Image (spheres, rainbow, N blue to C red):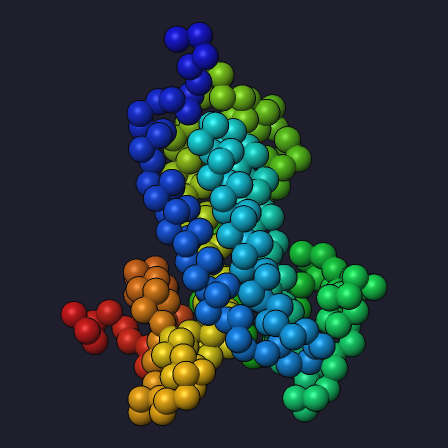
């Protein structure tokens, strides 16, 4: 076939990364809808600003899926870096608001100016935001657990190499007509990098904002004028419990314990319900 590309290889088309992307795309869609009702204290936003960010991340993951389907693996890594940037941005803004908010009616001007498009964030680049997170006492336990090895540094370097074509190999891997013997091996790395960013994002956010895990039952009852079931404000949304058990508990059980021990939410560890 004249138009056949490396993306038509059966092993490539059936790779687990596509199922993972579908799962994460659906997760961010549901997560965006779940948090919409929580106010973003410290800003003048009427709707939670994270609901827009999670929807935007959903779009980035959809774009990643499209370019991977075409065999443009290098472009996939460039978009993966964008996903990582968005996750770090989200962690940073939530942490910054928490650290700089004294009362619920206080406006955190730096974030408000960013929302209005008047200013960049105080640390308007990935390095500055990452350093702020790294030096935070609030997130130190999670940071330490995530950075026991060099996985995240290697992931970032891999994304940068493909974004900036730091090697001619990075050029070739983005050409879906060129046979690359390590294409599947690199796709395996992509899958692992994608999962690691997802875990990083949720680990920090659930540790900071445990109410983001709350199922909608409590608010649904109030909205229709009936009394919520006892303790329903502590129920965890099923899709969050599922992803928490399948990924965070399995890969970073110590972080799962940290989150569980810090929250009043009825979050369970896998062993507790098997």
The residue that appears at 33% across and 41% down in the rendered structure is 16
Q: Going by the picture, which residue comes out furthest to the right?
A: 118
Judge left or right: residue 170 versus residue 6: right
Residue lying farthest top?
2
Total labels: the figure holds 0
Please give the name of the residue rendered at 54% of the width and 26% of the height, measured from the top-left corner. 174
Residue 71: x %, y % from top left: 47, 27
Kindly indicate the quadrant of the structure image that contains residue 181.
Answer: top left
Residue 246, above or below 113: above
Residue 241: where, in percent of width, then height?
33, 69
In the rendered image, the vertical position of residue 43 relative to residue 251, given as above or below: below
Q: Is residue 261 visible?
A: no
Between 131 and 237, the one nearer to me in the picture: 237
Residue visible at 68% across and 84% down in the picture: 101
Q: Nearer the viewer, residue 171 or 105?
A: 105
Q: Is residue 163 visible?
A: yes
Image-based side of 72 in relation to 21, left or right: right
Q: Residue furthest left?
A: 274
Residue 192 lies, in percent from the top left, at: 41, 47
Residue 215 image point, x, y percent? 38, 75
On the rendered image, what quadrant is the N terminus found in?
A: top left
Q: Can you say whether 263 is above or below 60 in the image? A: below
Q: In which quarter of the view is residue 145 placed?
A: bottom left
Relative to 192, say whether 256 is above or below. below
Which residue is depicted at the point 51% across and 52% down? 58
Most foreground residue, 165 or 95: 95
Which quarter of the rendered picture does the C terminus lie within?
A: bottom left
């Amino acid at each position: 076939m004249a138009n056949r590309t490396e993306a038509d290889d059966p092993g490539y088309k059936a790779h687990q990364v596509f199922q993972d992307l579908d799962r994460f795309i659906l997760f961010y869609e549901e997560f965006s809808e779940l948090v919409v009702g929580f106010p973003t204290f410290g800003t003048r936003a009427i709707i939670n600003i994270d609901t827009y960010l999670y929807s935007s991340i959903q779009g980035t993951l959809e774009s990643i899926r499209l370019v991977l389907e075409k065999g443009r693996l290098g472009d996939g890594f460039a978009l993966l870096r964008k996903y990582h940037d968005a996750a770090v941005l989200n962690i940073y803004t939530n942490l910054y608001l928490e650290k700089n908010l004294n009362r619920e009616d206080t406006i955190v001007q730096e974030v408000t100016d960013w929302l209005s498009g008047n200013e960049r964030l105080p640390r308007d680049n990935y390095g500055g935001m990452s350093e702020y997170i790294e030096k935070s006492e609030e997130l130190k336990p999670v940071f330490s657990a995530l950075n026991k090895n060099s996985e995240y540094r290697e992931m970032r370097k891999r994304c940068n190499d493909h974004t900036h074509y730091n090697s001619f190999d990075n050029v070739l891997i983005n050409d879906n007509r060129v046979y690359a013997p390590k294409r599947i091996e690199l796709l395996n790395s992509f899958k692992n990098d994608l999962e690691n960013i997802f875990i990083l994002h949720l680990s920090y956010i659930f540790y900071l904002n445990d109410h983001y895990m709350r199922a909608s039952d409590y608010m649904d009852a109030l909205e229709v004028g009936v009394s919520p079931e006892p303790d329903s404000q502590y129920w965890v949304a099923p899709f969050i419990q599922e992803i928490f058990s399948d990924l965070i508990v399995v890969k970073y059980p110590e972080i799962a314990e940290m989150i569980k021990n810090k929250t009043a939410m009825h979050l369970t560890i896998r062993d507790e319900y098997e």
